[in-house]
Amino acid sequence: MSDYSQGPGWWQASDGKWYPPQGEAAAPPQQPYGQPQQPYGAPAEGSKAQAAFVLGIISLFINPCFICGILAIVWGGREKDYNSKAKTGWILGIIGTILSFLWIGIVVSVNG
């Protein structure tokens, strides 16, 4: 269905729309020349969830790496489908951030 005839065999109905010949499906609309459907270098689906998961693990074992924990919290919490990796990264990020700040507090109190 289209507002204009797309070639031979198309017919115009009483609603003013053009329809393809019988037995043929309408051609999908084409993208303008030179514009890809997906931008080059676009991140893969779930890449933020994977990043949150890895950063959450890093924040647990490398102290004080509270920046990794904060990034894991942000990226894990903003994931659209909130899958298990995003959820795990979010939780590990919270735990790692708390442990990092506790570690910094202990070091400052001992050396202070």
Image (cartoon, rainbow, N blue to C red):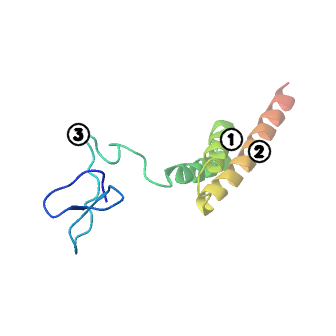
Q: Tell me which residue sits at (71%, 54%) in the image.
A: 91
Q: Badge 2 is on which residue?
A: 99
What's under tag 2, amino acid-wise?
Answer: Leu
Task: Identify which residue, 66 or 30, lies in the foreground.
Answer: 30
Q: Is residue 47 left or right of residue 91?
A: left
Q: Are marks 1 and 2 in contact (CB under 8 Å)?
A: yes
- Chain-order first, disc 1 or disc 2: 1
Q: Nearer the viewer's eye, disc 1 or disc 3?
A: 3
How far apart marks 1 and 3 lie (CA) works out to 48 Å
Residue furthest out toward the top:
112
Q: Could you tell me which quadrant the C terminus lies in?
A: top right
Q: Earlier in the sequence, mark 2 or mark 3?
A: 3
- Quarter of the figure with the N terminus: bottom left
- For badge 3, the amino acid type reads Gly
Look at mark 1 in the image and give the residue it sits on: 63
Work out which residue is located at the far front of the displayed protein and give it.
Answer: 14
Observer-side mark, 2 or 3, equals 3
Residue that badge 3 annotates? 34
